[in-house]
Structures are given as C-alpha cells and as structure tokens.
Image (tube, grey):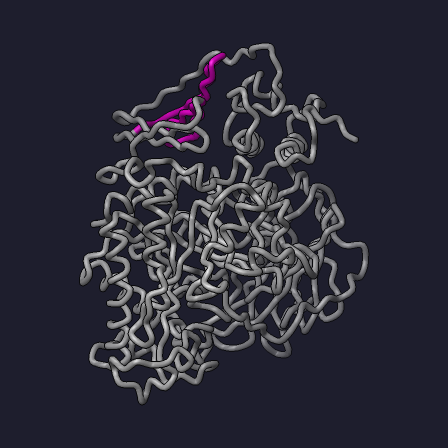
Amino acid sequence: MKTRFMKAGAILTAAVIGAGVYAAVPADAEDALFESECESLTLADGAEVATKVYNDEYPGYTGDGFVWIKGGGTMSFTVDAPKTGMYRLVSKCLMYLGESGEIREGAVSVERADGSSWSKIVKIPHTDSWSDFSFGDIKLTEGENTITFGGGWGYCLYDSVTLTATPAPDYSKASDTPVDPKATPEAKSLLAYLKSVYGKHIISGQQEIYGGGNDGNMELEFEWIEEKTGKQPAIRGFDFMNYNPLYGWEDGTTERAVDWTKNKNGIVTASWHINVPIDFENYTLGDEVDWKQCTYKNYQSSNSTFNTANAIVEGTKEYEYFQAAMEDLAEQLLILQENNVPIILRPLHEAQGNEGNYSDGTSWFWWGDRGPEVYKELWKLLYTTLTEKYDLHNIIWEYNSYNYSNSPTWYPGDEYVDIVAYDKYNVEYNRDDGLTSGPNVSAISAIYNYMVELTDGKKMVAMSENDTIPTVENLTVENAGWLYFCPWYGDHLMSERYQDPVTLSETYNSEYCITLDELPSDWLTAYAVGGDITTTEPKETTTTTTEITTTETVSTTTESQTTTSTETTTVTGSTSATTEKTGETVTTTTTSATSSTTTTDDTPSGDVCYGDVNLDNEVTMIDIVYLNKYLAGVIQFNDQQLTNANCCSDDNVDTSDSNVLLKYMVHKIAALPFKGE
C-alpha cells in the first residue's frame, strides 16, 4: 500500500430540472434498455442544446443537435430496471478541448430504486470526431433508477446515449497455458488450477508485512485472520524489496515463501518494491547506500536523479543498476524454483499510478515515471532476463493495470502476461457505495469488466491488493469473478474501517471462497502434466460434468437422476480437471466435426429441496451460480430444478429467487422457501 495522490476537483452536482426522461426496460438483455438523443434528456444548468460551439461546427451528430456541457452541466434520465444488476452506459460524444493524448474529466451518478446512490469521475480523452465513450458499468436496483452524467471538468459535446445490460464475463476464454513456453510443471499446474476455479470461486489471500514490521512478527495478520474466521488464506503475499544492491539484507522472505508452499500447501505471490539511490547521479555501482537515501517513488516526489528511460538502454549506469537488481531478484526466485515452488510474480506494479501518461511522466513509482513506452520495454527486459539469462521458469507473470481510458497503452502484451490484476483501494478515496466511511464491500464489477476487456477475456483477472474484501453477495450479484483477493497488511486488514470481522468470517467460511485448508493437496503436480490438465480426487462425491462445445452444454449427475441438454458441434482433443472445493469435474471431449442434439429424462423426482438447483442434494453457492446462469438464458432447467429454484414459493423463477437464495446462504434468511416478512 502506498500514499495515494488526489487530483484537485470534485464531482459537481447540479439540480435536476423537470421530471426526467422515463423508459421501461425490456427483459431481453441483448436489446438496449434505454436509447435517446441527448437533447431529449433532462438538462441541468450548464448543459444546452447546440449545433455548433461558437463558430465551430462538428458534423456527424444525429437528431436535432447535440448537448454542449459547460462546467458542471449534466443530463439525466430515469429507467425502470427489471432486476438488480450491472448496466453499461455509453454515450456518443466528442471531447473537443485539448490535443491528442490529453484527458478531461466527466462524472456519472445514479440514485437507485432502493434509496442508495453512487457516483464516480471518469477520464474522457480528447477526440477529433464523434466516438462512443463508455462511462462504465453501473449497478442498478430493481425499480426506477435515475442516472445523471456529464459534469466533472466539463466542456464536452454529447450526441446520444445508450444503456444496456452488462454482459456476463465468459470465463472460459481465459488461458491456462503459461506465456513462458519452458514453464515448470509446477507453474503449469498452478495456472491450470487457478483456471479450474476461475469464475466459480474466489481464492483468499493476504499480504504479509515486509522488512522488520510488526516488531518482527510476520504472522500477525495471519493469526488475526484465524482468530476471526477459524481459517487461513490460501495465498500469501510477499515482497522482495529488501534483496537489492544497495542496503540488501536477509529478512527471511524467501524462506517463508518456500515454507508456505512446501509445508503449508499454500500459493505464493509477490511484489517487488525495488529501490534506486536518490542521488543516482553521484552513485557508484556496487556502493552500499543507506535505505533512507533510497526510493521506489517517482523522480518528481523523491527528487531522484535516476532516469528510468536509461534503464532499458545498454551501456548506461541505470541499465547496469537494473541488471544488478534483477540478479538479486533472480537469486531468490531460483531458490523457489529449486524447491519446486511456483510464484505469481507481480513486478513493476501499479506503473500507471496517479494516472500516468502525462507530459512529465507522473506516476508514483520510478518504473512508471517516464510513461508507458519505457515501462513496457522495462517489463519485457525483466521477462527476458529472468527467463533466458537466469533460466527461471517457475513464474506466473501478473501485470498490474488501472482502468483509465488510456490504460491499454501500458499493457506489455499477451505474450508477456499470464494474469491481469487490479489494486482496489476505495474506502479512503473513490468510494462507490454512497457512504463516507466504513468498509466498502462493493465488488467493483465495472473495474473487473474493464480488466477482462483489456485482454478480451484471454487472461484471468485478480484483485492483487485491496482494502475491504467484497462480500460474496456483491461478488455474485455483480457477476465479478475476481480470481483472488489479497488485502494489504496492517489496518487495511485489521481495522474496522476496512473490514467488518463478522462479514470477513462469512466470506472465509462461504462455499464461494477457497481457503488454505480447501486447496487440493496435490495442486502442485496434479493439474498440469506436459501442459494438459489432469484429474485429482475430489473432496466431495458430487460430480458435475460439462461438455465444452460451440454452444453451452450442461450435464448434472446425482444419485437420483441425470439431466443433460446438449446441442453440440465438436472438434478434437480431450481434457478434464476436478476442483476439490466443490468436487466439480470439467471435461472437454471431442471427435471430428459433427453436430448432434441429446436430451435425457427431465422428470422431477417429486421431492422439493428449495435452493438445490443443481440437484446434488445440497444447497451451496454453486446453486446460485446455476440459478444466475438460468436467469441469464445460458442454461435450461428441468421441472425438478424449476421447482427447487422457486425459493420465494410464488410459482415464478426470477431474480427474487436468486436474491432470496443468496440471503439464505449468508444466513440473513433462516429457511426456504421464503414467503416474506
């Protein structure tokens, strides 16, 4: 966790004039839920309909004109949401101020049907012509919601607006093949295991303090978690910052990392707050430098003379220093590799911190303070040096992104990244729950979806650092399938400002969250042999088999019945994997290209077990996943499943049943079916 810098300026809220524009929302998620010319919306002071700005014309707009937002001007409309969920707001607009690459601010907010509110600032890049700009994904609650947008640091032109249901992520697209073609069997197995639970569960994690913090008690956070939850996190976060060419000292990080995997069966992740001398200009390579004279901050705030742009140029002192730093890191990673310990490595993290891409290279770490092009070359140099020069292949490469409009310009490329990660800190700043203090348990699905789209879903997305852990309810309702969470140490875990211990325990003890005791005992070896996923013994006897084809196929097997609905076009190849958390087996089976349709008996057994929609004689978080897939039209239910899914006992299966089932799972409802207060 670092000190966060805030830009001056706040959301400017204008009073809405008139009753607002109202639209009924169709049930079909594929259709636009709301479409309008912006001049037809409710406009507040500072927003006016125009056909030109002063004497400048901007051809290409539709309708009778466009809305010219000046200062805090806003537009608003009201929409009747059929269910609680995420919706995407896109406006055709033109940011006419500034030059190419410059950014202005806008704002979006919502007053929800349930009385809650939400707002955020967005970054709108300069454009020379009309283009679609996404304000991101907005959570609406069932009923009438009023959305307001524009404002911020205004002076932008808006032509039209569209609101659609946010599509559910396609978790199957994420790769489980390491980008390093020489990846060790353990690294392959780790990535394959992560893929096997991605979108179905969230893995628990916790960052340890580094150096001599907590008076040398590196277990303080972990003891606190066990005291509050009875569990331990499955992932432990480390930091290799103290292995460096300046003041380097042995703080036991590598030894603890080996122990975490070898003796506790846990997963290792690590960052690398690598330091540089502040007075680099007068520094002689190899000299010892007191840690107080070193920094990992940018040159603007630290006054360092280290020029990051030179770190990728052979023959420079910066290049030679970075080589020495990589050697120190490689020595520690080699110890892990020799002990068959794979690592999710998150080096050069938060490179776009403080928004980056400004003319002065502003970002809060030195590795990002010269902009995206230098940063990407630095990442590639690190990847190539560790894998080729030091022959390290136990690394899962995790890239730490932001969700600004220009964030894709920082991405090193699919061939250098295994996992995309985001660091969530939104209790102190950028709250999205309408509150001013206390834990912010939002699943920030808008950011999650942005991270997914950054690579078109090809990479798994993790919450590599965070303050408050999102609730299982929000993770499910918001359809945000974060791979894992990992709170920062100290108050970010142990202060009630950031975590409610009761909620934390509910999360750790839920079926959705994987803890240390629930990791497969053989995750190091069983999930990938020669790159292929293999099957391990499940902890539970229930088995769900899914044939992955060109269309959705779901087959559910229980003691009492088998239900299959399959429409398939198959290709070649076969793999399978079992998740010990749920006993779920995923199988891909194919032959030559043929098409077939298979159905089996879907006669209900006659008994009703409310909530057991996957018919495994248990009510777990997996049932919520199945129910949400049914409601989204991804899978079909037979009569018994429909009967069991009717948790409200009102003869309809809809989002109310999903909400009731979730409340039952988190112990807010004592029994099913729920018939109201």
Residue lying at the far right in this picture: please name it. Answer: 18
Residue 478 in view in this figure:
no
Q: Which residues are magenta?
A: 542-570
Residue at the image point whose x is 26% and y is 36% from the top: 532
Is 547 one of the magenta-colored residues? yes
Residue at the image point whose x is 53% and y is 58% from the top: 424
Pick the quarter of the image with the C terminus. top right
Residue 8 x %, y %: 62, 76
Front residue of this view, candidates 358 and 323:
323
Residue 70 x %, y %: 67, 73
Is 104 one of the magenta-colored residues? no
Question: Relative to residue 101, is residue 530 depicted above or below?
Answer: above
Front residue of this view, candidates 599 and 180:
180
In the image, 629: left or right of 186? right
Question: Relative to residue 278, is residue 502 depicted above or below?
Answer: above
Front residue of this view, candidates 435 and 45:
435
Quarter holding residue 516:
top left
Quarter holding residue 153:
bottom right
Residue at the image point whose x is 34% and y is 72% from the top: 374
Residue 85 in view in this figure:
yes
Quarter holding residue 593:
top left
Front residue of this view, candidates 351 and 158:
351
Residue 544 x %, y %: 43, 25
Question: Relative to residue 35, is residue 549 depicted above or below?
Answer: above
Residue 179 x %, y %: 28, 51
Residue at the image point whose x is 71% and y is 54% from the top: 117
